[in-house]
Amino acid sequence: MSEFAELTFRGRTIRLPATVGTEGEIGLDVSALRDEMGVITLDPGYGNTGSCQSSIAFIDGDQGILRYRGYDIADLAEHSAFLEVAYLLLHGNLPEADQFDEFAEGVMDNMLVHENLRHFFNAFPRDAHPMAVAAAVVASLATFYPESMGARRGPDAMESCRRLLAKLPTIVAWSYKQSRGVPVTYPRCDLGYVQNFLHMMFSTPYRTYEPDPAVSRAMDLMFLLHADHEQNCSTSTVRMVGSSQANMFASISAGVSALWGPLHGGANQALIEMLQYIQLAGLTARQFVDKVKNKEAGIRLMGFGHRVYKNYDPRAMVLKKAAGDVLQKLGVQGRLMDTAMELEQVALSDPYFLERKLYPNVDFYSGIILHAIGMPTNMFTAIFAIGRMPGWLSQWMEMNSDPQTRIARPRQIYTGATQRTYVPFRQRGDGRIPNRRPCSAGE
Ligand code: ACO
């Protein structure tokens, strides 16, 4: 008999079978709880809830470990590159040379978007946030590929994966061009994935942007380090929307929206805005940290803390070094960077942060790098989205191949009013009948 836990409540006992993962993580299966005992589990924020079994990413938050398909993140960061990691996540294994060539060519061939889609960009206001544009345009891709909408697994679904992976950099870069009121730049087949993104962002009809190799490498690294992070908020959103059998484009668009929040992918933009605020308000790092500790107006130290990592964020370790390299290579200095470094120092030696196990997360250093290379602040989260795309896609594909997948539908504990009877307007308050009447009812 396999392992189980016993739960006793009001004199009744139920066995909860244990599922053990390949790294020894144990999940107790509570799926029969409600049917057999009439109770549910309550776990706000899902901190102790496993929603699926997955073979894509492994995290040990206490040890600061992140692995994609078994490969350590630091190993991949040192030896691999984003597109190879995208293949790894999507297919489960590292590619051989011909497999990689075929994959990379498939992605490059798809970087262009339908010409009609280009006109969408003109319809958005100049100051539209790139994440709003990205979510809208990604969802609208479904209208251009109606034949792929039903594909949930196999080669057709994989083709949609390549399309999304290929087109998001174009969509993001074009949203920037639109916000500047300048013509869009088309992708080039002689450039790699990251170089193409930088080219579409910064080349103009009269000047070709030649990125510094240190900038291309830092950008690739950032994409790679963000590529997957198991069941985080945006990935769970992608799975949740996909569990209703909504198409891949709709599911990914929902993931883009979830990522936008400042507690998730929006933290890198929020970090720079926080640094700007500190400067404008004339505060020292110490004074700002004290404000955070006093929980004044709900201010948090952006780029610090993580739901899972309670030791250090292994992605942040890699990016911290990359940030140092980029700052040195580009000779970037300035008060903003000094403030970031001071904040890091102050927080890392402050009992408030140490006791709560709050360390710099990946967004702290990605914000610094993106700022250093001159990326507009409101583009930061959209860049995170480009990096996260392989993870969203892999998780969506895995979910659709998992026979255990059901529509995601959490329960709740209702805390509202118990049953009451409707009272007509004339018996409510001063008895006045409203001028705007809801149909003819309520009198
Ligand atoms: N600054 C100050 N205090 C913090 C911070 C922070 N950044 N993060 C957590 N805390 C405090 C909380 O106030 C709370 O204190 P209390 O016990 O006195 O009430 C305690 O630490 C625990 O915080 P929770 O909110 O329960 O932690 P949770 O796991 O829910 O939140 C999160 C994780 C959202 C990442 C949080 O640390 C945070 O808001 N960080 C800042 C935003 C950020 O950088 N997000 C990016 C995350 S990485 C990513 O998405 C790629």
Image (cartoon, rainbow, N blue to C red):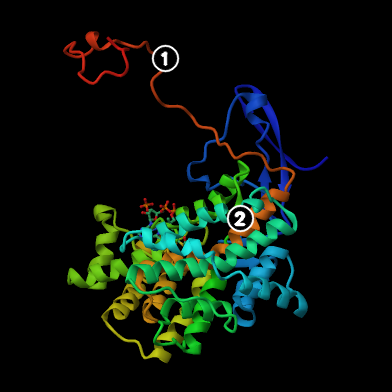
Relative placement, left or right, of 114 versus 364 is right
Q: Position of residue 263 (x, y in %)?
A: 41, 56
Q: For mark 2, what is the residue?
A: 145
Which quarter of the rendered picture does the N terminus lie within?
top right
Q: Position of residue 425 (x, y in %)?
A: 25, 12
Contact flag, marks 1 and 2 (Cβ < 8 Å): no
The answer to which image quadrant residue 99 occupies is bottom right
Measured in 3D between alpha carbons, the distance from the residue under mark 1 to the one under mark 2, in whole angstroms, is: 48 Å
| Amino acid on which the number 1 mark rests in the picture | Gln
Asked whether the viewer can see residue 321, the reply is no
Q: Is residue 118 above or below residue 148?
A: below
| Amino acid on which the number 2 mark rests in the picture | Tyr
Q: Position of residue 284 (x, y in %)?
A: 22, 73
Would the CB of label 1 be found within 8 Å of ligand 1?
Answer: no
Asked whether the viewer can see residue 27, the reply is yes
Q: For mark 1, what is the residue?
A: 419
Q: Report the front residue among 328 and 180.
A: 180
Question: Could you say whether the residue bearing mark 2 is in a helix, strand or loop?
Answer: loop
Q: Report the front residue among 80 and 298.
A: 80
Which quarter of the rendered picture does the C terminus lie within?
top left
Q: How many marks?
A: 2
Q: Residue furthest front?
A: 116
Q: Nearer the viewer, mark 1 or mark 2?
A: 2
- The picture quadrant for ligand 1 comes to bottom left
Q: Is residue 24 above or below residue 408?
A: below
